[in-house]
Structure formats: C-alpha cells, structure tokens
Image (cartoon, rainbow, N blue to C red):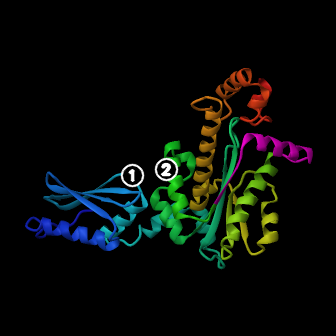
C-alpha cells in the first residue's frame, strides 16, 4: 500500500498510533508489539494462533506497507481493515473460486451454498483411500481463497497440512473418510465378488461424505464432485435422500474452492495415515505413488514382517503387489 505523503513526515508517530487503534478496533484482544526500523516501524500483531508482521516505512514517496509472516485469516483481515477494503477484489475472488462456482451462480435457484468432494490415495500402492467433502457459502469461499486454498496437487505436503487446519476452522461443515489398507482390501474384495470395481468403491466414499455434510445444511442444493468415471451412482443415491440437490460431476473440478478444500483435507488425512503406518513398521516414511520404489519397499517389508503385515500396508489389487 502506498499513500500520499502529506504531513506524515511531521506526524509519523501519530500515524502509527492511529494504525494501532484501527487494529484494536478490529479485535481488542489482539496483542501489538512495536519495533523501530530504519525509516519506519515494525508492528507484530498476534492472537492465540496467528502472528502477522507489518513493517510501515515513511519514505520519500509516502507510507509503504510490507506484510510479513505466512498467509493466514488474521493477515487477510488486517489487510482488509488497514487498506480500506472490506473484502478482496470481488472479481478476483470469483475467478479464484472457480468455474464450477460460476456455473452454479448463474443458475436461478442457486442459494449461494454448495458442497464439494474429492479423494486422495487412489493411485498410491501404500496407504489409505481417503474421500473428503467440504460445504461452503460465499463468505466461507472468499475466506478460503484468501487463505491460499487450492488444489492439493499445486502445493507441497507441508503446506497441505498447514492449510488443512485452517480449512477445518473456516469451513466447519466437512467430513473426511479414510479406508486404511486392511479395510480397503476387504471392501475391494466385496466389490469384486459383486461384479463391481474400484469406481464403485470410490462412489460409495463420495456418497458417504457428501451425505454427511448435506444433512448438516438442508439449505444446500448443489454438490460438486471431481469426476473420476463417466458413469456412477453418486447422483442417483444422493437424490433419494436429497431430491432437491443438484449433483454436478466435472473433470478438473478442483478449480472450484469447495472441491479444492476437500482435496486438501483428503490429502492431509492421507499423509497422516501414511505416517502412522510407517511408524508401525519402524520406518521414517513409506513411498508414495506406485513406482518401483514402492514395490521394492513392499518386498523388503514382506521379507521382514510377512505377507499378513504387508497386506495391512498396501492395496493388494495393485500391479505392484503382483510383482512381489
């Protein structure tokens, strides 16, 4: 932010005092500490779980703000308060929320509330299959965008774990379902015995998580699913209980913020379970994906622990298993 200089040279201290009053007017419980800088002042603002650093410089071209610290809801809120914007640029927010949201927004009966679901672990030999759903309204969606939430494939695992905590706080109507390998293998065998396949297992997961979030918000009449097959029973199953809910399935639905948030929660749970499984067998980590490294690791673990132990770690219908 750059302001005209006016008389700030003579009254920079008063300007800083006014900034602190604005911050306190937003939340009286915020703690503000002050540190002198060359040509400016650094304000550190903290609450129970966030810290925001704002360096304010009084230069020849006027006042300049430099924001520090990681992106957080508190930082976004303070930026809005101190720059005079009550929300981020609406056009940018709508674009970031995603094309699927735009599609729904143009429907006459859209109530401004929607759910999104996505999965993680489908292509990983080790570890669980996880499906998650998140319900948002316009305000929640804007908040998630400002927090930096996006498709989990676009961010690293450390960022996934950090964002997952923020998503749960910002969008409390969410559900995460994890099928650990032992249960996954059991359910997959049941599906095969009934002439079904992995897509049916995935469909059941999406149905379960979406059903749970839709039950918590009767006003919601749209749900978005990242499409993984051309034909499934997600819509038919959900509309038996929720006849007024329109189920939209699209490729690359992670462009929508609700589905993106679900992808982050699903990935975070996948990482959590992977760490649990690794610790159970005395490893720092287990290989992700379905590469030769995963096959080699599984082969070593079977020699060490036996077939039964391995089948509690991996998806046994994968080609990797057949190679061992």
Q: Is residue 98 magenta?
A: no
Dots 2, 1 in contact, CB < 8 A? yes
Q: Residues within 10 Å of mark 1 (few under 14, many from 20)?
A: few
Give me the residue at 60% from left, 55% from top.
Answer: 254
Q: Looking at the picture, tell me which residue is in the foreground, 229 or 209.
A: 209
Helix, strand or loop at label 1? It is: loop
Q: Which residue is mark 2?
A: 162
Front residue of 284 and 122: 284
Task: Residue 298 in the image: state x and y as whole percent.
Answer: 70, 26
Task: Judge left or right: residue 169 versus residue 71.
Answer: right
Query: x%, y% of residue 314?
Result: 73, 35
- Seen in the picture, residue 106 relative to 153 is either above or below; the reply is below
Please, which residue is most extreme toward the bottom here? 108
Q: Is residue 94 visible?
A: no
Q: Mark 2 falls on what kind of element?
A: helix
Instruction: Give the position of the C terminus as an image quadrant.
Output: top right
Q: Which residues are magenta?
A: 175-197
- In the rendered image, which residue does mark 1 sit on? 70
Q: Quadrant of residue 273?
A: top right
Residue projecting furthest to the right = 194
Q: Is residue 75 left or right of residue 60?
A: right
Rendered residue at 78%/55% (across/down): 204
Residue 123: percent from left, percent from top: 69, 40
Numbered tag placed on residue 23 in the rendering? none
Side of 217 relative to 80 (left or right): right
Is 300 situated above or below 226? above
Q: Tell me the residue at 78%/27% (across/down).
A: 307
Horizontal and vertical percent position of residue 39: 14, 54
The residue lying furthest to the left in this view is: 10
Q: Is residue 308 left or right of residue 169?
A: right
Mark closer to the chain start, 2 or 1: 1
């Amino acid at each position: 932010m750059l302001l005209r200089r006016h008389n700030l040279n003579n009254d920079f201290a008063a300007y800083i005092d006014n900034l602190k009053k604005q911050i306190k007017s937003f939340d009286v419980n915020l703690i503000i500490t002050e540190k002198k800088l060359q040509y400016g002042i650094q304000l550190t603002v903290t609450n129970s779980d966030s810290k925001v650093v704002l360096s304010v410089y009084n230069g020849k071209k006027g006042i300049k703000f430099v924001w520090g610290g990681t992106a957080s809801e508190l930082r976004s809120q303070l930026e809005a308060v101190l720059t005079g914007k009550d929300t981020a640029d609406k056009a940018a927010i709508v674009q970031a929320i995603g094309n699927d949201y735009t599609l729904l927004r143009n429907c006459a009966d859209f109530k401004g509330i929607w759910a999104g679901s996505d999965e993680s672990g489908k292509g990983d030999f080790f570890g669980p299959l996880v499906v998650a759903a998140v319900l948002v309204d316009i305000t929640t969606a804007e908040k998630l965008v400002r927090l930096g939430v996006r498709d989990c494939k676009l961010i690293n695992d450390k960022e996934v774990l950090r964002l997952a905590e923020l998503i749960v706080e910002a969008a409390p109507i969410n559900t995460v379902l994890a099928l650990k390998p032992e249960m996954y293998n059991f359910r997959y065998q049941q599906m095969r015995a009934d002439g079904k396949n992995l897509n049916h297992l995935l469909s059941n997961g999406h149905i379960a998580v979406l059903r749970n979030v839709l039950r918590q918000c009767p006003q919601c009449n749209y749900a978005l699913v990242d499409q993984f097959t051309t034909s499934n029973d997600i819509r038919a199953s959900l509309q038996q209980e929720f006849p007024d809910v329109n189920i939209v399935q699209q490729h690359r639905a992670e462009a929508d913020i609700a589905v993106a948030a679900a992808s982050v929660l699903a990935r975070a749970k996948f990482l959590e379970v992977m760490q649990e499984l690794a610790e159970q067998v005395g490893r720092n980590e287990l290989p992700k994906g379905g590469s030769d490294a995963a096959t080699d690791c599984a082969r070593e673990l079977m020699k060490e622990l036996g077939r039964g132990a391995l089948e509690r770690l991996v998806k046994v219908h994968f080609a990797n298993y057949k190679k061992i």
